Amino acid sequence: MTGFATRLHQQIQRKRTPALIGIDPRWDWLPAEIRQQATAAGGHQSEIIARGFERFSLEILEIAAPHVAVVKPQVAFFEQHGVAGMQALQTVMRAARKLGLLVIADAKRGDIGTTAEAYAAGWLAGADPDAAAWPADALTVNPYLGGDTLEPFANLAQQRGAGLYVLVRTSNPGAAEFQDRLTEGTSMYTAVALAVARAADKYRAADEYYGSVGAVVGATWPQQLQELRALMPRVPLLVPGYGSQGGTSADAAAAFAADGLGAVVNSSRGINFAWRRPGYQEKFGEGKWREAVAESIQEMIADLAEHTAAGVLRNSGAV
């Protein structure tokens, strides 16, 4: 079975960009037209919000699909609205797969033994979108309970052609509080990175350079990103923190190999709600929010191409 990283990189080469679009719907930020339509259909407040989230997310997918390879729905935004929210998430994930997009479910799951197996079975569909209730190609995983907790996820990911992105150096300002703590001269994030590298080696197919076990490393920590790429040269990276969190394309540059592969860079709010950004607000406003989303995607693609090795992909002539 073709592994996740191979499928991902094939799509990145086709689209000629490692740009990753996060799907992070927020009710108060949705365009008024979508909130009004969702409200008019009636129902409990959670149903109304879920309806709005679904329509908004589906429109983002339609705009993004011709230009990027992968999207990342943030599960929490849907989960907070109960059954209706999770039904909307499932609809959005299935729609993304039908559009040819790879889906990374940002759920940050992590547990021991059979509980981890259950999480993995529920989320890691991999190459076959019908293999799991939530048709994710890959899943974000929290390793805090120990390296053995990665095994159930990695085992099933290998079987299904799915992927994992293990939290190593997260993009938030408070990450250093725990992740920088030293034990015998080694930081926690370094210890986690070494465990991820070992798991990646164990579960990598013989014919793959990158495997199914990846890592999350924020663009907001460029020095650590460079260090961690050196520690994990054959681990696919998911790089959050670009855009609204302050990370730049230059900050993310160390994540990439010379061929422009090896990483995806995420932007969520800066794309989803582009019309609220300075410059875009004046140019588009809420009335042209779709146009703002489309232009912000192109801006991100061009920015990554200019300041990272992703420019090799942009100039490759691939289709």
Image: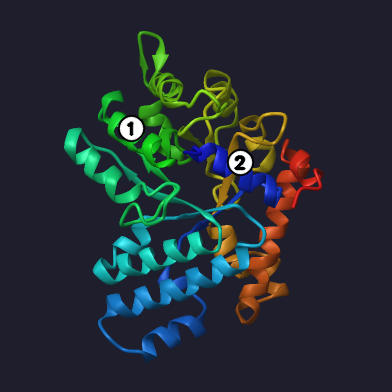
Picture layout, residue 58 above or below residue 66: below
Relative depth, front residue between 115 and 135: 135
Q: Where residue 5 appears, x then y in whole percent?
A: 53, 37
Q: Does the image show residue 18?
A: no
Q: Where residue 270 appears, x then y in whole percent?
A: 58, 58
Q: How many marks?
A: 2
Relative depth, front residue between 130 and 142: 130
User: Mark 2 sits on what residue?
Assistant: 9
Picture layout, residue 7 above or below residue 276: above
* Mark 1 crowd level (few <14, some 14–19, many ≥20, 10 Å Cα): some
Amino acid marked by disc 2:
His
Picture layout, residue 157 above or below residue 46: above
User: Mark 1 sits on what residue?
Assistant: 155
Query: Are the residues flagged by discs 2 and 1 in contact, CB closer than 8 Å?
Result: no
Q: Where residue 194 appears, x then y in whole percent?
A: 43, 19
Amino acid marked by disc 1:
Asn
Residue occupying image coordinates x 28% and y 33%:
152
* Mark 2 crowd level (few <14, some 14–19, many ≥20, 10 Å Cα): many
| CA–CA distance in space, label 2 to label 1 | 21 Å
Task: Determine the secondary structure under disc 2.
Answer: helix
Q: Where residue 115 appears, x then y in whole percent?
A: 19, 40
Residue occupying image coordinates x 65% and y 78%:
288
Relative depth, front residue between 101 and 51: 101
Residue occupying image coordinates x 58% and y 19%:
230
Q: Quadrant of residue 10?
A: top right
Residue occupying image coordinates x 54% and y 56%:
101
Q: Residue furthest left?
A: 114
70 displayed left or right of 117: right
